[in-house]
Structures are given as C-alpha cells and as structure tokens.
Image (cartoon, coloured by chain):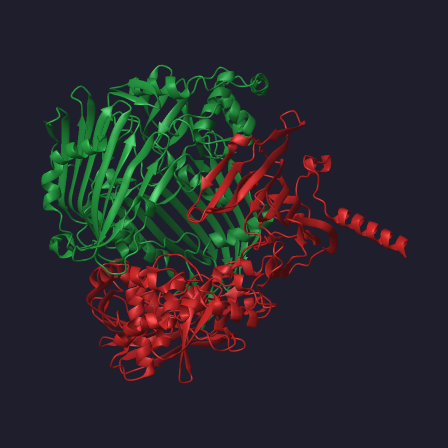
Amino acid sequence: MMRGFIIAGFLTVCWVSVNAQQNYDASLIPKELLPYASSVVRNEEVTIEVKDLDNMVYHVKKAITVLNKNGDQMANLYVDHDKSTSIKYIKGIIYNSFGITVKKISESDFDEANAWDGFSLFLDTKIKSYRPVVSEYPYTVVYEYEQRLKQTLYIPGWEPNPHFGVALEKSSYTFLCKPDFKIRLKEINMPGKVNISSNAQGLKSYYWQMSGIKAVKDEPLNPNDDDYLSSVKIAPEKFLYYGMAGSFTNYKELGKWEYDNLVAKRDELPYETIQYVKNLTASISDPKLKAKKIYEYMQSKTHYVSVQVGVGGWQPFLASDVDRQNYGDCKALVNYTRALLKAVNIESYYCEVEADADYKISFAHDFPCMQGNHIILCVPFKNDTTWADCTSQTLPFGYLGDFTDDRTVLAVTPEGGKLLHTPKYTVETNLRNRKADFSISDDGELSGTMSTIFKGVQYTDRDYFLKEPKMEQYKILPRVYQINNMDIDDFELNQDKSFDPATTEKLKLHARDFATLNDGKIYFSLNPINRKGYVPRQVRNRTTDVYFNEGYTDNDEITYTIPKGYRLEKMVLNEKLDKPFGNFTATMELKGDKLTYKRKFQLIGGTYNKAIYPDVVDFFQAVVDADEYNVVLVKSGN
Amino acid sequence: MKRPLLILFFLFNALAFASAQDFPFGAVTTEEMNMKNYAKDTSAHAVVLQEFGKSSINIGSDDNLKQFYEYHVKIKIFDAKAFNKGTVKIMLYSNDKNDAYEDVSNIKGVTYYKDDNGFTQKAELEDKKVYPVKENKYWASHKFAMPGLRDGCIIEYKYRVESFRWYKLRSWEFQDDIPKLYSEYEVHIPAFFNFNASIKGYLKLTKNTSSVESTCFEARGAKADCSLINYGMADIPAFKEDDYMTSPKNFLSAINFELVDWQSPYDGSKHKETKEWRDIDYSLKTEPNFGGQLKRKGLLKDKVAAIIAGKPDDLAKAKAIYQHWQKWFKWDGFWSIYSESISKAIDKHSGDIADINLSLATALSTAGLNTEVVLLSTRDNGALNTLYPVIGDFDYVVAKVNIGDQAYLLDATDPLLPFGVLPFKCLNDKGRVFSLDKPSYFMDMSLPQREKSSYILDVTLQDDGKLKGTLVNYSTGYEAYKRRVAIKKFNSIDEYVENLNGKLPKWKFTKSEVRNLDSLDMPVVEQYDVEIKVYDKLGETKKATFSPYYIHRMTTNPFKLNERSFPIDMGMASEDRYAITVHLPAGYMVDTPPQTMAISIPNNGGKYISSYEPGDNSFSFIYLTQFNKSVYGTEEFPSIKEFYNKIIQSQKTEMVLKKK
C-alpha cells in the first residue's frame, strides 16, 4: 500500500514527462546529440522523498539507448545496499532499436556480490548488478528501482551527465520533504535554477531538469569534472545517521557532531604502549621531533589494511585495536597516531580530505556536508603546522605528496570542525636535478657517472624499488632509463627523511653501442636520460580549460667527452620556449672534446584558458623534438 | 606364516603414520625468529618455512561424498614488502543457482613477533575479523588480515574446506612468488576412486611416497582402504616473471589430479571418467551439453538453409554461416566448453563461448560441411598436459571446418574476427580436434597466424620545409583485426582520424579514407593526404640532415637484462614494412644516403632489412622487420636482444641533403 502511495505521489510531479517519453525508438534521438556519443540517456527521473529523519526514499527511472559497443557499459546497472540502505524493488526492460520490448528484467536476473573498491580487504556493502547482453545496436534499457535510506545525513545528489561519450536527452531531479525539513543546496554549472513548489500532499518540492546535452569528449588535460559538469548537491540541517541525531549549518557544527559521534573516545591505549612511547621520546625536547619519532614508530609498527564496517565506514577502529592488530585503514591509523601523540601531550587533528593525485579537490567553503575519501593527520605546532599521511610506511613526517597537497580539508576537533589548507608544493620545490659526466669511446661505448636529486613530489620517484635488495635494484635501474645496453657498475640510492626530504641517486654505468659509427661519422642521442615522450593530443573545438595538476622543474646537465678530432656536422640544438604554463631550454656546446648539454624543463601547475591549448601542444612537441636530437659527429677536416 | 605378516602390517602402519603428518601448529624456533634473510635468495622479502596440505575423500556430516582439504602454512616475513602475504583470501565455490556451496571451517591464525623490548609475542587472529565475501555468481571467499605484522615476524595459519566436489581433487602449487623451504601435499584416496596425478614445472619432487591406509573409508557398510600419497618438495625457488613470457602456469611447479574411474561406495556401480582419448571421445559424444548439442541439426535446418541459399560453393556457405553467427550472437563474457542448450542461446542472441561456437559447428555441419570442433587451452590457462588425457585442461572451444585441403578455425564470439582467424588468446600449445564420427586428434594451435603491416609514404619536400603527399597503410592478418578494434573504439571513422591526427601534431591529415573496415577478410587500408612539418624553412643552410625513419623509429630496446629464464613469447609471427619515397625540390640532391643493413636472427628466426634506391631527383628507402616465430627459446635471447640493438643503432644514422 505504501509503495503505491509513493509512486502515485511521485507521478503527480513527473507524469507529463513520463507520458511524453514512452517511445524508445532510437531514431527519435535528436541528430545533434549523436556526435561523440556511444550512448544517449533518453530520460532519467530521480526522486528523493524525505519521509522522516530515518527514512528517505530514493527512486530512479532511467532509459538509456546504446548506439554501439563502446556504449555497452553505460547500460550496466549497479545498485548498492547495506545496513542503512535497502532496495525496495529493482527491474527493467530492454527494447530493440524500434522501441519494441525484447526482454523484461526482474529482480532475480540481478547478480549479487560484495562491493569491491580495488584495494579494501572487506566492504560491508553489497551490490546488485545487471549487465545486458544485446547483440543488435542500437538498443534501449529502461531501469526502475527504489531504495530506502534509513538516514538523512547523506542525500544523494544529481549528476545528470558525468560520463564521456554519453549524450543526454532529458534528466530531472526532484527532492521532496516536509516543509519544516530544512536543506541547503548547491547548484554547480547549472544552466537553470531550482523550481520550488508545494505538491498536492503538502510536501515541499525542489525540481531541476536538463535536456539536450551533447556528449562530453575526453580531452587531454581537462579539469576536474566538478569544474565544468552540472550537478546539484543537497545537505540536511537536521538528520539521523545510524540512529545518531545531529544538525549543522556550518563546518564547525558538522565537525563537532562528527567528533563527538564518530571519533571521540576511541583513542584509549594500553598502559604499556603509553609508557613505551613516553620512554621512546623521553630524551627529545623539541615537540616536532618528538612527533616525528612517534610517527616513525607508528610507521614501523603498522601497515595499511582497509576494512569498512560499522557506521557507514566513517568511524575509525579503536586505537587499542590497531595497537594489537598492527593494521588499519586511514581512519584507524590517524586515530592511532593521534592517540600515541596524545600520550606524550602533543595535540593533533583528525582531518578529512578529498585525496586525489590528479586533481586538487577542496572542501567547498560555502557548502558544508559529509565528504572526503581519506583521512590525514595534522599536528598544529606553533607557527609550524605539520601534516602527515599515516597509511604509508615510508614517507617522511611532514610529507603529503600530490595525493593530498594544496587543498582545503576539514579538521575534526573536540571544538568542532575547522577548515584548513594543506601545504602546496611549488614548481621550484618539485625538483629533479641531474648531472652526468659521460665519455664516448672510439668504438661507441658510453661510460661515466650520473647523479640525481629528487625533491618535492618527485621525492617519491624511486620509492617503488627503494626497498628492494641491491641485487634486484641492479636489474631495475636500467629499465628506468632509455639508454640501451646499460650496465650499472655501481650505484647508491639514499633518502634524506628530514623536513626537507630528498632522494639521491648516484650511478656509475657503461653502455656498449651507445653511439653508432658509420662511414666515419658518429651518431648518438644527445639526451638519453630524460626524454619527454608525451605530446597531448590535438583537439578539435576544445570545450574544457587546460589543467596541469602539479608544476615541477627538471634540470639536466650532461658533459660528454667525445673522441678526439671530431666536429659537429649539423646545426646545434638551441631551443628556448617560454609560455605562461611552462618553459624549456635545451642547449649544446662543443669545446674541444667536451660536449655540454643543458636542459631545463618547467611546468607551472594551474588552470589555463582553453584558447591556449594549441600552444600547449606545440610546446610539448617542440620539447619532444629537442629531446630526440641526434648528435652527428664528423672527423675534422672532412 | 602369521608372524611376519603382522610385522609387515605394523611396519606399514608406522610408515604411514610417519609420513602422514602435518607439522605442529603454534611452534616457532628461536632460529626462525632470528632469521634476517633467506640465504639461498637474499632478494626474498618472505620465505615459506613450512607448508602442508591434505586432501581426502570421505563421507560428510550429511552422509554424502565430500572432499576435505586442509591447509597449513608458516611464513617468515622479512620486511613490509611482503606484508601482503598476511592478507589471505580463501576461495570457495558457491553457486546460488543450484545451492552448491563449499564450506570453510577451523580457520586459525597466529603471528609471532618480537615486541619493542625484544620478547617474542603472539597475536592471534580473531574469529570476528574473518570476513565472508560473496565474490560473484559462482564464487565466495573468506578473507582475513593477519594481526600484529611487523618486519621479521612469522605468520602461521590453517583452515579446512569441505567440498561437495569430491571428484575435483585439489591441485597443489609448490611454487609461488616467494621461495619455500618445504612444501608437502598429502592425499588420501579411497580405493573406490582412481585419479591420475601430473606434475608440472621443471622442479623435482624430493619426496614421493605412497602407502596403503587400511579401512580409512566407511560408508553405509561399504569399506575401503586408501592410498596415501605424499608429495614433497624442498628448497623451492621463488617464481619470477619475465617480460614477453607465456602464462606463468606453464612453468610453475604444481601437481594436478584428474579422476580416471570410480566405483560407487553405495551401489557398487562403476564409472569411467578418463583413461584414453577414445574414452573422452565417447563421453563427449554422449554428453548432452557437448555431443548432444552438436547433434541438433534439425533445430537449425531451416535457419541454415536460408543463410546458404544461392551460395555457389562450400567456402561461400561456410563464410555466410560464420558471418551470420558473428552478427547474431553477442558473447556474454562467460567461458565454457559445454553448452546447456544452443537453442536457448540462439533465442537469446547471446551465450557463452560454447553456446556460440558449438552452435556454429552444428550449423556448419547442418549445411553439409565437414565440421569438427577444437577444444583448447587459452594462453592464460597454460599448456596442456600431454601425458594422459585431461578434459579439465581445456577452457575454450572453437569450430573447425574443412574445405578441400584447407582447414579453417572459427570463433564467432568476436564480430571483428575475419573468417579463419582465431583470437590471440587461443593461439596456445595444442588443440584437440573432436567430431561425432572420428577419433579425436591433436593439432598445433600456435602456427599459421601472422600479423603484417605495411606503410607507404610518398611525399615531396616543399620549399616551406614540409613534406606533402600520401600515406597508405595496409594492415593484414591479425594486424587487420587489431586495427579494426582500434577504429571501432570510436563512434565513426571521422572520430578515429581526428584522434589519430591529434596524436601526430606535426602531421596534418588533409584527406582520409579507410577501406575494408567491414570486409573482414580483406586488409584494412587507410589512406591519408598528409603534410608533415620537417624544417621551419628550407634553404637557409646548404646542408640539411634528414632521418628517413618517419614512422615508428625504434629508439629503445625492449630487452634490458643480460640473462633470461624463460622463452620469449612474441605472440605470433609478424612483419612491419615501411617504404618512403621523397621527391626533392629542384636544386637539391642527396649528399649522404642513409645506412643500409641486412641482419637476421639465426635459424630463419627473422630479419631486418633496409635498402636505399636513388631516383630521378628523388629517393626511396625501405625498412622492414620480420619475426618468423611466435616463441623464441631462452638460448636465442642474446641474438634477439642484439637484433634490436643493431636496428636501433642503424636507425640513429641520418642522411644529408644538400643544395646543388
């Protein structure tokens, strides 16, 4: 009975559109929606009704036409359920290109499995999934399902068209609640405004719709989705979450609720552990060095294992649990480190962050809501706020890297939430400085030494094999460089884990047949150690701005001692490029038998107007060309 | 007479007891705790100290036949790189559709570590930290992370699995990505059952004993002795993968079992599973989900008649049926060598590998064509056991149609495969050819396929420093398939060309044409009018260097190491040919021609040839690389590496153009 009532209520809002869109004949798709589209959302209706603080009904009806094989995966449906979310019903129909029904999909056709995110040991969420297998294109799948959410903290938002290659004929989103249920909403890149009204049942209705949106092309160096795609987000003022009540209108209140309900009182440690860390740091007076010592102890003792159970995956394991198990996820490990620091009277914050190595995503100042996918640690020393990621066993204390740097995060503290900004690594601090001293023998063999310093986000460049035994490293190092037949005679790899961390690599090497001898001439690659192999693809009618996530600087200098009695045959390399987003110089000079090559490459992170894109392509192409420069030496006098 | 017998019996029992033994749980030695590395392989991040597995067939609590599997291992972890060894996943067959589940029980785990004060401590795995997971339609698992890991710790865990699949005796992998000091597998097989064991890999067993266990099996009054067999291996090196290698399964040391025949303990009925190929032939022929489907010609009669109507010869008929099947079906992503019902699959327009290819074979024979089916093992599944017939080794089935002297292998699960071309995954080892009326036989699956690409660039050097002309690219054989897949990733040819040109910023494609995209038996031909930027301006200098390696210049050797442990798998024989003709502007001539070269891989393994031909104010340059084999032995590694080295060296040279 109740379900019938809900659908009736929902129909009053959307009836008109449902009626108008019953025909799923693929030929009715407007022609202007076809370019770059492998599938088209014909119609989507998302409705959320808040019936009570612990009862939300989420109803979706979605019709998608798949035009070719590339669009198949857009026709797959995945719906999750867990302790606080149940699926009331789920069904679908497959239509052929003429809009004639070929198959009805019932709930028993769906597969069920535990959710897997690619790295967790266990997630307490199950997924119902359906993957249509249709041999003739185009075809259309219409799904309809309803979930009951026993909470109101997380209100599913609306992203009408978040995928490449999908065009959108029409999508709508309706949010229904009692008039006294207050919300805040955020409209991102929305062409139209919200339509607020009251329905026949006296519920307040917020309604958005979009139509006729062309498929988004996958363009190289595009900004984060949120910067150019449309979406709506809704946050409650009052809510229930796993039986816990709360309310917030700002980050301070949200953070307070989170601290009290999710984080507080989970930091108790066994007496022995407290004594152990006290003893460990007893001789250190500087609190920052104390904290570093404790962080390193935590790193040596624990490792990362993600298990997501309990309060929606938001509550850290008890610190005592981590102390016993030696493992935890980001929440558990930050909570544990906080507890260890507390044992030596150092205050620290549990911070929620949107971690992403490709984009720097900040918590929006103007829209407090539950968000983030990672937890990091902040230690607020006087005038020297220090950050750390507790899931790594190797990173230095105070090092975040491009996964969480330069973005606004929420510190969840006993006093409430505080927005903080993580430190930025600049173009000058993300450094790779390399010097090589090579000589080329009469028979074309290269030999010499090379030393490189990596700093900033480049500090971790060698981490993936740093812990391998030396014998293995001898085999891995030649794969890092583009020098053929490279044999390492000796090497050193060191990491300085101070507050200005640096990785140093020193190599002694030789490589036979480095240079080609032919017809009295010697040929070799001027830059065999740091060649750019990537030119972003040219794009017709680019629609998005150009985004470089992280700036960096590479300096390379090679001195070659060449066989005596040769001169350069072709024009010397002399490339100088200077653009708003980067600069590059590559020069060479022959003095006697010393050939010196200098290269500097600098990329400046940030977002640039799309009009600059052709310059970006030209810039990288010029760098690639310069990096491929081939030296031709010819016997003097010839 | 009585006495000696008794003694013998005694001895036998004692022997059986001595060998039938798991190592004790919960015991570590100081020596093990203090181990800093593994002397025989100091690069190991962990080493298995002891590993013991036991499988037996017996009656379960529900009075049905069951297989009981016990696993027990003790691993020394030297450093954090091997902490992943502490994350354990026990896979369990679990099919909701027919209520068939395997159960795991008695999971026990403990970690031994030295605490911060140097004392050895134990951390035990808690029951509630073992998580049951539903993986997919057919599989579930139990997962856990061992507690208390730290550098130098030892983890030990054991568990027991009860399986209704008594007939699928567990295989055992001796070798893993970390070394093992000792690994032993023990099987108890009641005399009712007879299994074949096959050992894979290049390592030798250090223990291989068998004895008789008396009355180890009792079910509803039926009693039997068991064979008790122990397979042990000591000092097992870690398995390390090379680039360009065939499935590691082909090289890993393991032992597999296949049920040969059995007698029901309940009613004494005898069942033969495998013994010789003719037994397999018979069982496949009579198997409803295999031979049964191949016999359903009546079902397809009308459908096939319509497809082949008017086709002049057998080849045209076969092609028509194959193409129809490719279009009719969409593969559902599942693998099988058995089809429940080809008619159901045909109605649904979708099915698994066997649904599609067995129905294809049935359709071909319905058309009166000489048709067989080929069972094979795909590349990831590894090579076949050739000691004795093992049906369980096969994981894929294709159709084979014989027309005149020519045999064509057909797989209709991929709509882009040309007639007679198999997907790359199928090119592995041998296949077994079956038919309803002849004995089965082996055929080589790695042979005839080739991939071939040819680029022809014909351009004129302009005064503005650009090359202007045409590029034609022919992709033949498997290369044509790959090209079609690449093109079909885009919604239209225009979008493909846009993307292709996008990746070549110095090139401008002013006109493009792609031919034979849907004529799967023809080479894919791409023709482009091109402008290539070479010099900013021509004519400022008297001399200009020019590299003729305009497309795919090789700069880096794919082989970096000096030694090689496994054969080099190049997939299939291939040929890449590049021909460039450049017309020079008036007043220019070639000063230094490009280096030419001809080298080969020994034993007709392949060749690289570059040749130069001056023309009338123009020149032509051709370079071509050919690999004639799909797999090269380890002993050929130095010559392959050197082959690449020579090509790279040669392609570094440049030619010089000069003003007359």
Instruction: Compare residues A279 and B571 and report the one nearer the observer.
Output: B571
**Total number of numbered discs in the rendering:** 0
Q: Which of B84 and A459 lies nearest the eye of the viewer? A: B84
Residue B424 % position (x, y): 42, 65
**A134 is higher (above) or lower (below) than B22:** below
Could you say where residue A179 lies in the image, as x and y percent from the top left? 15, 21
Please tell me the colour of chain B: red
Task: Give the x, y percent position of residue A48.
Answer: 21, 32
Q: Quadrant of residue B46?
A: top right
Q: Is residue A37 left or right of residue A347?
A: left
Using the image as rendered, state which of residue A598 and residue B612 is in the foreground: B612
Residue at 62% in and 44% down: B70
Quarter of the picture containing the C terminus of chain B is bottom left
Q: Where in the figure is residue A68, as x and y percent of width and height?
A: 24, 58
From the rendered image, report the letter of the chain displayed in green.
Answer: A
The N terminus of chain B - image quarter: bottom right
Q: Is residue B345 above or below residue B220?
A: below
Q: Which residue is at a point 62% across and 26% down the rendered structure image? A: B116
- The part of the image, by quadrant, that contains residue B462 is bottom left
Q: Toward the viewer: B462 or A454?
A: A454
Residue A636 seen: no
- Name above or below for residue B625 compared with residue A49: below
Q: Is residue B652 visible?
A: yes
